[in-house]
Image (spheres, rainbow, N blue to C red):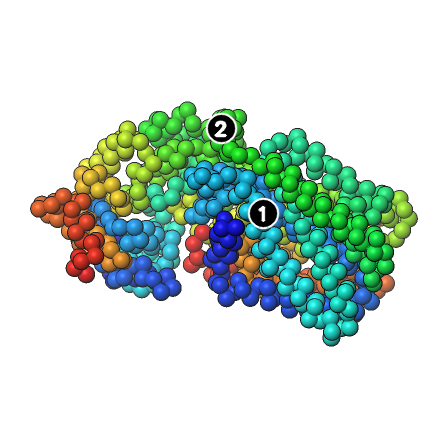
């Protein structure tokens, strides 16, 4: 318990160091307000989106969020093996103190569950509860939604913890597990062999209860299954945590010197050449290229294939067209920027004649080099698969402008530390506003592309013009924004 | 000519005065020592002087450049060994030195790298990723990166830390060579016996203020550096 308290305090202080205690404590209030507003306007939202789809999307999102914070096997190992710049953490202490790695990893796991429940899920549930009497929701429904969200989060975090701990010990086991998860998802998403509850039993719990159903037996079954899955995955992860982190001899073996060859490849980038070459080497050696493949390329491929299959294989028309997908890829791709800024510490740049803003610009260049090809291929593939090549003239500018707009906005607001700054509610609010407003606008306009092509295309081009102007303005201000900050 | 000029420099973090009216000058070609207990403000001073952070008040010029807004130009001209040895995790020792040489746009890269790999006996580990190197080896890599462009001014924050006695000796001999060549060195260290042998001028910082300054020979005429240091930073020392 003492260790857990210390870890919670450490996590709190770390987050406070990114902004301030007041800003950090405003985060749950911000989440509560968002949840309250969404809950109050839910009935209007239901006019366009089915409640069950909304619930499915929300729980899938919460589960994914749990997965993203739960990869402690990889993150913990990195923390143990190298100092995080100026920072060092309790999890790295077993090498120095009479503590076991297993108990510190368990502490870190429980800490994250408490931390994110208190920071995100608790306030979100509270927002829904506050809205309940005003919007006329039953307390039972509010309770079941809250329990479902908690279960989805716990399933996500425990799955990620187990896979990452096993994966950090054995690469073949990692590929096998990831392959199995992808196969289960393909079975649901593409072949419709079973419902989502096969992967996420919390969904089965929710759909068995009002307003979706009244099968209390099924609800109990899925509740018990969810809890047992969470406990089982946590136990497996706990049992598989390595008790020694002395590094293996193979990793210490001499590496081929690849930097000079990348320096030649990036000769066109002039003074950015060394920074881009180093990023390319980091991408390969840190395994970030694999994470990008898993979190960006794989979902895009999955989405392309399922859209094609539902359209052509099942002959069910999908309401979304190429312009919608292009804008989604543009907005979605911004996560790659946070991967690029999170590959390694940047403290040593303090000893070199490089400014923070130059480093940010090099990350933007690498982002564009990485995503342009992948995103274009994705949009082209979707256009040919769905027979929408006639929309390419509009979809490609939508893709490029939204990508540039999103990444420049993100770099302007968060610099070299997006993962940290997005915990500052002020920054998060501005980013949410910057990203959601144009996304909603482009989504609505994309629905009218077939019914009123001239009006929709003119409006989309006007939106792109505004986004481009904002992108250029933020890009110009980037230097001033980050010139007086350190790395 | 002064390599470093500092007048009434202040750096405030929230309610803490990390630097509280620091004034000193380091003449070109001087080996200058900056000493003080933990938290005295040495690392903050070094960060201000190398343009990593901006001062709250006061003036500071390094090689004639104002530290405000000239961080990149200052770091172009000087060599820095930071307090924490943290070379990039996923470059090998050789690649890191190659990277530094490229960023600094210096010629004859291969020869320069070979020289420093030989100097610190890093040939056997030059292909190992920096994250897999021992602390001492990482420190040698950081020292090589600071020396590779042969700067006329060096800022060294605890350069001897993590080095075994063989390399402490080797580094000390190299720094003595620099002193004889007339290069300027600004050294922060807690290893006072080595510092006393190296430094010509010095100052002692305590609570962000200069509590003693002058030539090492004069200040240590009646007592050694360690006794002087302990006397100046003790609780009943004159403010």
Q: Nearer the viewer, mark 1 or mark 2?
A: 1
Residue pictured at 21% horizontal, 57% vertical: B235
Residue pictured at 31% horizontal, 58% vertical: B18
Residue A338 location (% of width, % of height): 58, 50
Q: Nearer the viewer, residue A259 or B175?
A: B175
Q: Nearer the viewer, residue A214 or B125?
A: A214
Q: Which residue is mark 2?
A: A252
> Which residue is farthest left?
B222
Q: Is residue B163 left or right of residue A15?
A: left
Q: Is residue A419 left or right of residue A463?
A: left
Residue pictured at 45% horizontal, 48% vertical: A87
Q: Is residue B23 left or right of residue A6?
A: left
Residue A348 location (% of width, % of height): 42, 44
In the image, is residue B59 above or below residue B113? below
Disc 1/disc 2 C-alpha distance (Å): 29 Å
Quarter assignment of residue B237: bottom left
- Look at the image and tell me whether residue B216 can be seen: no
Q: Which residue is mark 1?
A: A109
- Look at the image and tell me whether residue A170 can be seen: yes
Q: Are marks 1 and 2 on the same chain?
A: yes
Which element is circle 2 on? helix
Q: Is residue B58 left or right of residue B202?
A: right
Residue pictured at 75% horizontal, 43% vertical: A301
Residue B56 location (% of width, % of height): 34, 63
């Amino acid at each position: 318990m003492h260790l857990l308290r210390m870890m919670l305090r450490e996590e709190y202080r770390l987050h406070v160091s990114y902004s301030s205690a007041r800003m950090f404590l405003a985060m749950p209030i911000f989440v509560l307000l968002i949840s309250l507003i969404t809950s109050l306007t839910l009935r209007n939202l239901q006019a366009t989106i089915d409640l069950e789809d909304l619930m499915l999307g929300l729980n899938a999102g919460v589960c994914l969020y749990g997965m993203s914070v739960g990869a402690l096997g990889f993150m913990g190992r990195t923390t143990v093996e190298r100092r995080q710049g100026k920072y060092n953490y309790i999890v790295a202490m077993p090498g120095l103190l009479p503590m076991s790695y297993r108990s510190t990893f368990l502490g870190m796991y429980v800490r994250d569950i408490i931390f994110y429940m208190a920071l995100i899920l608790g306030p979100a549930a509270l927002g829904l509860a506050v809205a309940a009497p005003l919007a006329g929701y039953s307390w039972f429904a509010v309770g079941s939604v809250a329990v479902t969200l908690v279960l989805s989060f716990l399933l996500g975090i425990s799955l990620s913890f187990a896979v990452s701990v096993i994966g950090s010990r054995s690469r073949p086991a990692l590929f096998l597990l990831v392959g199995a998860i992808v196969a289960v998802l393909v079975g649901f998403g593409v072949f419709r062999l079973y419902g989502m509850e096969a992967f996420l039993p919390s969904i089965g719990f929710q759909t068995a209860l009002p307003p979706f159903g009244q099968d209390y037996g099924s609800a109990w079954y899925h509740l018990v299954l969810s809890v047992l899955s969470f406990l089982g995955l946590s136990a497996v992860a706990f049992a598989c945590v390595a008790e020694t982190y002395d590094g293996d001899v193979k990793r210490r073996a001499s590496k081929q010197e690849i930097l000079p060859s990348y320096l030649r490849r990036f000769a066109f980038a002039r003074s950015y050449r060394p920074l881009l070459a180093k990023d390319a080497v980091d991408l390969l050696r840190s395994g970030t290229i694999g994470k990008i493949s898993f979190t960006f390329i794989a979902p895009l491929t999955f989405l392309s294939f399922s859209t094609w299959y539902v359209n052509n294989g099942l002959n069910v028309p999908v309401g979304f067209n190429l312009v919608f997908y292009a804008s989604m890829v543009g907005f979605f791709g911004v996560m790659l920027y946070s991967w690029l800024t999170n590959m390694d510490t940047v403290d040593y740049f303090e000893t070199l004649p490089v400014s923070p803003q130059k480093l940010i610009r090099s990350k933007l260049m690498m982002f564009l080099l990485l995503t342009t090809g992948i995103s274009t291929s994705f949009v082209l593939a979707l256009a040919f698969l769905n027979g929408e090549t006639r929309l390419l003239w509009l979809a490609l500018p939508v893709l490029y402008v939204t990508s540039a707009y999103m990444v420049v906005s993100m770099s302007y607001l968060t610099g070299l530390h997006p993962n940290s700054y997005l915990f500052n509610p002020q920054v998060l609010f501005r980013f949410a506003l910057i990203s959601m407003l144009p996304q909603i606008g482009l989504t609505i306009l994309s629905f009218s592309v077939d019914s009123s092509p001239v009006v929709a295309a003119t409006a989309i081009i006007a939106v792109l013009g505004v986004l481009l102007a904002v992108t250029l303005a933020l890009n110009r201000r980037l230097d001033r924004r980050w010139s007086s900050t350190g790395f | 000519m002064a390599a470093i000029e500092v007048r009434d420099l202040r750096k405030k973090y929230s309610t803490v005065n990390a630097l509280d009216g620091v004034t000193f000058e380091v003449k070109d070609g001087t080996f200058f020592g900056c000493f003080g207990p933990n938290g005295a403000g040495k690392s903050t001073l070094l960060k201000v002087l190398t343009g990593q952070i901006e001062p709250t008040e006061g003036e500071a010029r390094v090689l004639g450049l104002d530290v405000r807004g000239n961080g990149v130009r200052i770091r172009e001209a000087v060599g820095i060994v930071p307090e924490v040895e943290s070379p990039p995790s996923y470059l090998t020792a050789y690649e890191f030195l190659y990277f530094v040489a490229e960023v600094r746009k210096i010629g004859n890269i291969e020869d320069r790298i070979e020289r420093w790999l030989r100097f610190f006996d890093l040939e056997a580990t030059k292909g190992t990723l920096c994250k897999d190197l021992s602390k001492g080896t990482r420190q040698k890599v950081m020292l090589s990166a600071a020396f590779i462009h042969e700067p006329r001014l060096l800022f060294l924050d605890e350069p001897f830390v993590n080095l075994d006695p063989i390399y402490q000796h080797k580094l000390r001999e190299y720094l003595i060579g620099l002193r004889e060549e007339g290069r300027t060195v600004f050294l922060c260290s807690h290893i006072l016996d080595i510092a006393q042998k190296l430094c010509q001028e010095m100052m002692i910082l305590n609570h962000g203020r200069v509590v003693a300054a002058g030539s090492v020979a004069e200040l240590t005429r009646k007592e050694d550096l360690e006794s002087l240091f302990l006397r100046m930073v003790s609780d009943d020392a004159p403010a």
